[in-house]
Amino acid sequence: MTRDDVPQAAEFPEGQLADWRKLVDGVLKGAPFEKLVGKTYDGLKIEPLYQRAKDAAPVVGRSPAAPWQIMQRIDHPDAALANAQALTDLENGATGLALVFAAGSGAHGFGLEPSADAVAKVLKDVHVDAGMAIELQVGPQSRMAAIHVAEYVKTMGIDPAACNIRFGLDPLAAGAVWGRSPYTWDEIKVAVMSGIKGLAGLGFKGPFASADGRVIHDAGGSEVQELAFVLACGVAYLRAIEEAGVRFEQAQAMVYARLSADADQFLTMAKFRALRLLWARIEQACGLTPKPLFIAADTAWRMLTQRDPYVNMLRATMATFAAGLAGANAITVLPHTLALGLPDPFARRVARNTQLLLLEESNLAKVSDPAAGSGGVETLTSELSEAAWALFQETEKAGGAFAALQQGLFQGKVAATRKAREANIAKRRDVLTGVSEFPNLHEADVKVLEAKPITLAPYGAEKFRFASLSPMRLAVSFEQLRDKSDTKLMADGNRPKVFLANLGTPVDFMARATFAKSFFEAGGILAVDSEGFVDPAKLADAFKASGAELACLCSSDKVYAGQAQAAAKALQTASARAVYLAGRPTDAEAALRAAGVTGFVFASGDALATLDDAYRRMDVT
């Protein structure tokens, strides 16, 4: 044996978990170990360290070393301009087009006109039989788009079997978003099956029906809720297809899934892997030999921000990275300016190139399921699978997906998760970079295209009404405060201001002044910095000269003990509408409030409530 044959770490003793725990306990200094254990919104524990999973088999997704489909969103209301976008995308690296029609679940205000003429214009010079993928995103009002696409293929003399089209029929997702349905499930499935059998009869290979988990994710739901909803919808469509006389072996290829991918890398990876395992379990229960489920991914709508939208590029990159490594078959990156309006060519190019860079330069598709054997990802995959299966069983007991929506089963769980999520955002426990943390009040405007959205006629008379799963964005509450600030700036040339009343030396106040600046500017209140003060009178003069209406004391606890009360009284005398103190309330809270301190700003405090109160005190509406 040569030296090169000996593992480089052979001379070191093998690390043991118990040894690591001893080191951790020394750092914690008596604090409970549970402080290091996180939790998902499903209550699953996230341990700080996992051991390697032994004998873990890769979760089969794409074929070995096969790239995922680079889907580009086509949603411009003007069909001719949408066609120009599609051709540009295909010429510059996209391998598929996601045709988003108006009023579809993922349209987000825009979308194509679902007419035969518009379809023909959008697909002009697009070689739909040349190996590229097409995915339709339709809703009940735009359902005829699927028929128009099929008719276009026939008119052009193209063999339907040569086309790779996912038709995206999904009335369950549409009903969940709308919160109503004009038909019973028995009526709906007959219509769906009529469409599927018609398309299959023409020679299209599908898949035809989509089980869309984005509905849950967009509404603020959890990973378990999203997985269970996909399973419930997928099974509902499988049953409908089988009841229409199609053999399960054929039905197996007629259903596909769509999931949201967000910036939480490990949870996203575990979610995609879990869905494959869960669907294989369903296939086995149906007496089928499991085949890899086709899973399409969209980067998450709810994580997009209007403020500092360039950070959305980073979020989308992480989401694409996670979905790609977890075996997604197709990925659509939502352009970083979509929350502001219809994306321009630059935003579309960035969305496209995000995938190209990860595939062509980082070679992410070269390794199949690289997370296999990772203790953390394997554990999360297993726990998500178990919890999602339990919720799926609960849905089945309720009578299936449609009945569960009628009973509010999913809506109640999603609403609770959304409420918890919004509370953590308000307290900045869930950080939104560029919005709730590290805001930029001097950011330049971002360009979007001017386009008039298409308005479609109402669909059907309302027969059933239930709670809707309406989409949300996590950043909206902070963005609304920033809007107030912008309105004031346009009205009188000035933003709301808070004077950072720094006490002592920079060593004393710098950390809390930096925190306070980010805290207030997250709500659009411009922070006016200052030198350290000792004399309350000079502090009051500096406050008056700043033009601010609010003040925030910033220093160390030691300095606060000797100077905070006098400083607060001086600021109150100088007509400060509110005086805040950067730091947690202590035993001196009562004395500080008596001296004029209005409130305290600190990590995990309710930032939204404090900022709302600040605007109220300044009479800014």
Image (tube, rainbow, N blue to C red):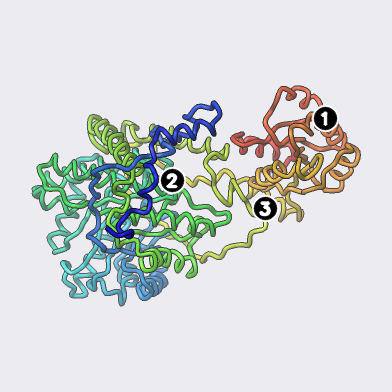
Q: Is residue 410 above or below residue 102?
A: above
Residue where numbered disc 3 is placed: 486
Number of the front mark, 1 or 3 = 1
Q: Nearer the viewer, residue 36 or 568?
A: 36
Tell me: 157 left or right of 175: left
In the rendered image, the vertical position of residue 307 relative to residue 555, given as above or below: below
Going 38% across and 34% down the picture, which residue do you hit?
A: 44
Give the residue type that dot 1 points to. Gly
Q: Let me know if residue 457 appears in the view.
A: no
Q: Position of residue 235 (x, y in %)?
A: 20, 42
Residue 268 x/y as whole percent: 37, 47
> What separation in Å lies between label 1 and label 2 (alpha carbons)?
50 Å
Whole-percent x and y of residue 204?
17, 63
Residue type at numbered disc 3: Asp
CA neighbours of label 2 inside 10 A, class few (<14), some (14 to 19), many (20+)? some
Q: Quadrant location of residue 465?
A: top left
Report the amino acid beneath label 2.
Pro
- Give the distance between the C-alpha atoms of the residues marked 2 and 3, in whole angstroms: 25 Å
Residue ID at (34%, 59%): 331
Q: Which residue is mark 1?
A: 562
User: Looking at the rendering, in which quadrant would you find the N terminus?
Assistant: bottom left
Asked if one can make out residue 133 in the rendered structure from this viewpoint, the answer is yes
Which numbered disc flags the more N-terminal residue, 2 or 3? 2
Q: Which residue is drawn at the image coordinates 56% and 29% (left, top)? A: 29
Question: Is 440 placed left or right of 336 in the picture?
Answer: right
